Image (cartoon, rainbow, N blue to C red):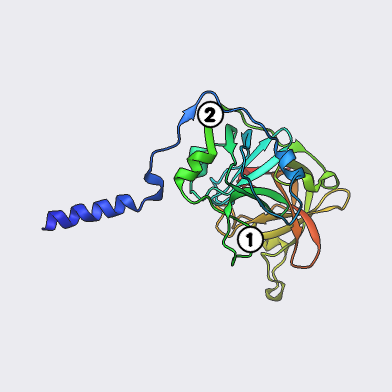
Amino acid sequence: MRLRLIYACIVLLLGGCYNSTTPPTITTELPSANYLIGELREGLSKGKHHTIDEGCIIVGRVTSSDRDDNFYRTMMVQDQSGGIEVVVGLDRLHTTYPEGLLVALNLEGCTLGYRYGTLQVGSSAPSYENYDIDYLHSQIDVHRVITRSDDIEILEPAPHTIAELREDMCGELVEVGHLRLIASTSIDTLRNESLANAIWQGYALFCDEANDTLLVFTRDYAAYANNTIPHSIRALRGIVQHGKHRNGREYYQLKMRYAEDCTTY
């Protein structure tokens, strides 16, 4: 009886491991793209969402990494026309879909929408939620939507000034240089904390040499969230986003992937 109980527990534990299913197949030849990400953006107005009911395949390279947990269960893919966020719903995506990997996305049956100006794809969120795009329902759905290749080539971020950022660039990997820290939500001025105490956690506001401003967001659970923010930054890399901050102003913002996305002088 005791052995049966132990065996039953093992079976339950194995069945409850969401990431224990067969990994996706790697193919040397991806299906051909019949859409560009930029075309999907042009066909979907800001604030709207749409379920794709016909064949739609895009091909691009992974530009994100969840290694440091600033991206959580989502993956960025970029082609020559723009970037899109796949709301996957799995952990440790950087081990299965590493940065630079060439993938094909079969979007038939998926829902498109926007979050922070970035085009997202996933499943339709329940009507009672205040967002449009939810995670893909299962690993079966993930493997149907995402086809992996064996082709890995890291995409270099496009260099831009803050003034050059545009809404149609949301979702793309860029690099912005020569930044100075001017504010942070991580400090408490009532406790006499100053920018010298600022850490990456939350929102940090930077300005460049032209005094244009840019927000940088870091999740509380990111591996580098408690690191001190450098006051002068030579280059900052990340995914472009756009949205309204809690002070009512609209900002472009970057979402870093890992600590190395920030380089100092």
Position of residue 120 relative to residue 194, above or below, is above
Whether residue 7 is visible to the viewer of this picture, yes or no, is: yes
Picture coordinates of residue 165, whole percent (x, y): 81, 46
Quarter of the image holding residue 20? top left
- In front of the other: label 2 or label 1? 1
55 or 220: nearer the eye? Answer: 55
Mark drawn on residue 131:
1
Q: Is residue 68 above or below residue 38?
A: below
- Looking at the picture, how far across and down is residue 143, in whole percent? 48, 39
* Label 1 SS: loop
Amino acid type at circle 2 is: Ser
**Count of marks, rendered view:** 2
Q: Residues within 10 Å of mark 1 (few under 14, many from 20)?
A: some
Say which element carries label 2: strand
Give the farthest residue toward the front.
54
Q: In the rendered image, is residue 173 in sight? A: no
Amino acid type of the residue that numbered disc 1 sits on in the rendered structure: Tyr
Q: Which residue is mark 2?
A: 149
Label 2: how many Cα within 10 Å (few below 14, some 14–19, many 20+): some
Residue 124 image offset from top left, x and y in percent:
58, 55
- Name the residue rendered at 54%, 38% in the picture: 146
Indicate left or right for 201 with 18 as reference.
right
Tag of residue 189? none
Residue that lies at the very extreme toward the left in this rendered image: 1
Residue 205 appears left or right of 52: right
In depth, the one of 47 and 3 nearer the eye is: 47
Q: Which residue is nearer to you in this view: 254 or 34? A: 34
